[in-house]
């Protein structure tokens, strides 16, 4: 009998590895352990120095640059997927960005340009990826993105990313509905706070970590491997009848107001 979560032979594209402790890294490790074939991206040549040791250790087959703000770069990435693999089985979108001056200020003070940039990189890029992945998933597939509970309640200092993540979650539901007829599923994973390099851009994030640790029933925060375990299940055939969900992996933090 084969394992319930078996990704042997499945081709997955991981977007968002920044260094060894990224959420995307935890997911990629879980995908690899379950037998998946992986490709991964790096933001630019400077970031590649941090990403390359991680992907080498995980046995990632190939890498490519991907800055969704550069015209044509995302399309070139999916062109490589077609050329190298001829198709795609799953994708992880684990990128987010907001200009510091907009992220650290009040939402009502955010600039039009800052809001637009945050939405483009953190939300609309997922829709662009879904569109580009659609023709590559001829027999179905799964699209994952990463959100946070600041999307549905006010989290101090999360600021502009709250509305942006709310939009991402709504987009995920529409992707699931629109691509469901082609057996393409979509989910947003909502981890509890994790001390990653990306999260360090949020003002006073250490205080958020302390509050979360005090609140969860088990008194222990999740880590990137917990997120990876859920991601591996969601892209597997074991979850083929599950789509359009916003799934928390936060040790029960979402239970409390």
Image (tube, grey):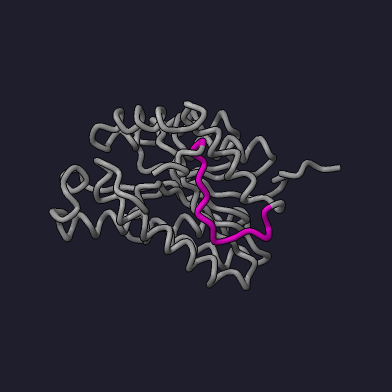
Residue at (67%, 53%) from the top-left corner? 239
Q: Is residue 177 left or right of residue 216?
A: right
The magenta stretch spans residue 138: no
Tell me which corner region of the image, top left, top right, bottom left or bottom right, holds residue 103.
top left
**Does residue 245 appear in this view?**
yes
Quarter assignment of residue 19: top left
Residue 10 sits above or below residue 243 on the image = above
> 111 and 62: which one is in front?
111
Q: Nearer the viewer, residue 68 or 179?
A: 179
Left or right: 99 in relation to 2: left
Q: Is residue 107 left or right of 12 when viewed as pictured?
A: left
Q: Position of residue 249 (x, y in %)?
A: 52, 41
Is residue 49 in view from this perspective? no
Point out residue 74 in the picture as x, y percentages from the top left corner.
Answer: 41, 57
- Total of numbered circles in the picture? 0
Residue 23 is situated, as x and y percent measured from the top left of the image, at 46, 38
- Inspect the magenta stretch and tell me whether residue 240 lies in it: yes
Q: Is residue 53 above or below residue 151?
A: above
Q: Position of residue 27 (x, y in %)?
A: 54, 39
130 or 201, which lies in front?
201
Q: Residue at x 36, y 38 (%)?
A: 45
Work out which quarter of the rendered image holds the C terminus and state it: top left
Q: Which range of residues does the magenta coloring cover?
A: 239-251
- Which residue: 60% across, 69% down? 180
Image quadrant where residue 186 sits: bottom right
Q: Which residue sits at x=82%, y=43%?
A: 2
- Considering every residue shown, the one lying at the far right of the view is 1
* Quadrant including the N terminus: top right
């Amino acid at each position: 009998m084969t394992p319930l979560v078996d990704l042997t032979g499945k081709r997955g594209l991981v977007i968002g590895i920044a260094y060894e402790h990224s959420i995307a890294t935890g997911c990629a490790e879980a995908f690899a352990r379950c037998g998946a074939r992986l490709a991964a991206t790096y933001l630019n040549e400077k970031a590649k120095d941090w990403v390359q040791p991680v992907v080498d250790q995980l046995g990632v087959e190939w890498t490519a640059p991907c800055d969704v703000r550069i015209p044509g770069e995302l399309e070139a990435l999916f062109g490589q997927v077609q050329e190298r693999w001829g198709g795609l089985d799953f994708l992880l979108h684990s990128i987010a960005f907001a200009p510091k001056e907009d992220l650290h200020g009040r939402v009502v003070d955010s600039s039009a340009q800052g809001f637009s940039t945050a939405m483009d990189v953190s939300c609309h890029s997922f829709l662009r990826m879904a569109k580009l992945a659609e023709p590559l998933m001829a027999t179905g597939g799964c699209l994952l993105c990463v959100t946070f509970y600041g999307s549905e309640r006010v989290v101090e200092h999360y600021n502009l990313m709250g509305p942006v993540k709310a939009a991402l979650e709504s987009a995920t539901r529409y992707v699931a509905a629109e691509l469901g007829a082609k057996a393409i599923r979509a989910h947003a994973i909502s981890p509890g706070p994790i001390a990653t390099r990306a999260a360090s851009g949020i003002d006073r994030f250490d205080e958020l970590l302390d509050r979360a640790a005090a609140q969860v029933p088990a008194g222990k925060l999740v880590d990137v491997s917990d997120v990876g375990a859920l991601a591996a299940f969601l892209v597997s055939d074991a979850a083929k009848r599950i789509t359009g969900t916003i799934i928390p992996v936060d040790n029960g933090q979402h239970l409390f107001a």
